[in-house]
Amino acid sequence: MTQSTYSRLIRFLQDDLSISAASLAVALRHSEQDPGPLPMILWQYGLVTLEQLEQIYDWLETA
């Protein structure tokens, strides 16, 4: 994922899905320890619902 796409993804998570900055910070810390796709990390730690996870992947398909 390019830096531009990554930045837009973060904006989408915060603006459209109302994911808090604190939740994103938790997910980013975990991704440093256990690398994986950010959307999956958000879901694994209960920071997004399954429906939100689907919305994230739908957004990524068109990004």
Image (cartoon, rainbow, N blue to C red):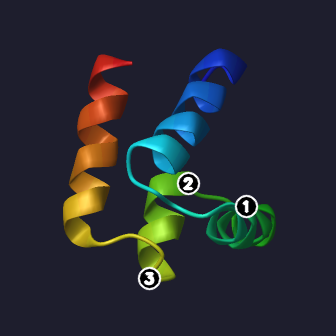
Q: Is residue 16 visible to the viewer in this orientation of the structure?
A: yes
Residue 21 found in image quarter: bottom right
Rendered-image quadrant of the C terminus: top left
Q: Where residue 61 sits in the image (x, y, percent)?
A: 28, 26
Q: Is there a contact, CB below 8 Å, between mark 1 and mark 2?
A: yes
Q: Which mark is residue 46?
A: 3
Q: Which residue is under mark 1?
A: 28
For marks 1 and 2 on the same chain, the one whose residue lies earlier in the sequence: 1
Q: Where residue 13 sits in the image (x, y, percent)?
A: 49, 47
**Residue at image point 23% right, 69% down:** 50
**Label 1 crowd bin: few (<14), some (14–19), many (20+), radius 10 Å:** some
Q: Which residue is under mark 2?
A: 38
Secondary structure, mark 1, is helix
**Residue at image point 57% right, 36% down:** 11
Query: Residue type at mark 2?
Result: Leu
CA separation, marks 3 and 1?
14 Å
Query: Residue type at mark 3?
Result: Gly
Front-most of 49 and 37?
49
Q: Where residue 37 sits in the image (x, y, percent)?
A: 53, 52
Is 29 situated left or right of 11 in this image?
right
Q: Is there a contact, CB below 8 Å, between mark 3 and mark 2?
A: no
**Label 3 crowd bin: few (<14), some (14–19), many (20+), radius 10 Å:** few
Query: Residue type at mark 1?
Result: Leu
**Residue at image point 48% right, 75% down:** 47
Mark 3 against mark 2, which lies toward the viewer? 3
